[in-house]
Image (cartoon, helix red, strand yellow):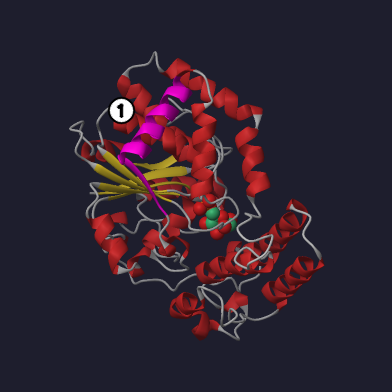
Amino acid sequence: MPATPPVLLANEPGSFPHGVLAERHPAIIRQVREAFPYGPERHRALDALLASCTEGVVEPLPADAHDAGRWAAWGAGEFAGRSWFDVPWLWSESWFYRRLLHAVGYFTPGPWQGIDPFRPSKSAELDAPGTDQELGALDALAERSPDERERALLHGSLWGNRADLGFRLSAADGDTPSGTPPLVADDSEALWALLPPTGTATLCLIADNAGRELVPDLLLVAHLLTRRRIGRAVLHVKPYPYYVSDATHADVLDALRRLTSAPGAAGAHGRTLWSALTDGRLVVRAHPFSCAPLPYADMPGDLREELAGATLTVLKGDLNYRRLVGDRRWPPTTPFADVTAAFPGPVAALRTLKSDVITGLDAATEAALVAAEGQKWRTSGTHALIQVRG
Ligand SMILES: O=P(O)(O)OC[C@H]1O[C@](O)(CO)[C@@H](O)[C@@H]1O
């Protein structure tokens, strides 16, 4: 393995991480302000957060915050007093969402306690007419062979990470603007090989976004249960709202209701999931580490033990990928197996490319991407990967 590069910071103007802190976070604060009729106190707290995250320094959580100790252990003490731009990017992004929840009173006893500031946008996505069309497309899939169906559902889950629920029947479906292949790595055969139809496998699916990503994730789980490629699934979601659209338990219930009220194949999958939840074949977990600003290499013992017992853990999305391989600008040909060696048990990443982090490419693929797009392919979300380490 090449020398380990440093973790990404956001202190280089013009870089992708810098843009996230300098532009995306202020835009998220604007979006949240408009999501609900928050009172003056909440607006003042949002003003203070805006000033802190753009020009200020990391300030510790109030000592009585329920998770002050946890965040202290995760680095809040070490980074206090430093510019948000000078601490690891993964850390400052994660800290932003924790501070945002503080600003809107999510954890504070009172009327705003437990109100997800991102709920309006999550609901709009789930309720959009496009979702009906996409769910309707499942009926046409029923006429395809089981293998084709399975492949389409895997790709639905993969591309759902782009918030683009398309049940693609082939890897070459869709074009990238530069004409390069959408999939930069495809270990799907290895994934299927890990899940033969014996009905005994346990799948841990570490979910990413709610709505139009979570729906195809759930459909994939329903299909795997039905085909007995798995006997049990554990769906890991976030314990509180995070990274705008990350799925919480409430979002799982919303998605499930959307499915069970749909006609045709979507409704049937919804009922499969409902009964799997009630009989324990499907379990939802919200481990605190799911919102940790740390790589999975640092996961606590209880989570490590749980994932070690899974036949396969699937991690969805860009952020989970960054946490899986380390939030570093690896040479793209760094072997995926090497950077995931510390992960307990077989692991698969399903992700569209939305940050600079990438591993496991072959040299020809990297060269073709760079020739066609410079470095844009890393962050544009038009490429995706399926990587597996058995
Ligand atoms: O929803 P995903 O796929 O985890 O993507 C989130 C990505 O968006 C960003 O927050 C900003 O683009 C990245 O930091 C992060 O990796």
Could you say which is closer to the camera, residue 142 or residue 332?
142
Task: Indicate the position of residue 370 as horizontal and vertical percent values.
Answer: 50, 50
State the image coordinates of residue 311 (x, y, percent, origin top left): 23, 46
**Which residue is depicted at the point 67% across and 39% down?**
124
**Quarter-wise, where is residue 99 in the image?**
bottom right
Residues in magenta, as a range = 265-285
Q: Going by the picture, which residue comes out furthest to the right?
A: 40
318 in relation to 231, above or below: below
Residue 63 location, quadrant: bottom right
Query: What secondary structure is the stretch in magenta mostly built from?
Result: helix
Residue 278 relative to residue 240: left or right: left
Question: According to the image, label 1 marks what residue?
Answer: 226
Is residue 293 in view?
Answer: yes
Q: x and y percent of residue 40 in the render?
A: 82, 67
| Dot 1 crowding, Cα within 10 Å, few <14, some 14–19, many 20+ | some
Q: Which residue lies at the image location 73% right of the left edge and 54% below the top edge?
A: 31
Picture layout, residue 91 above or below residue 186: below
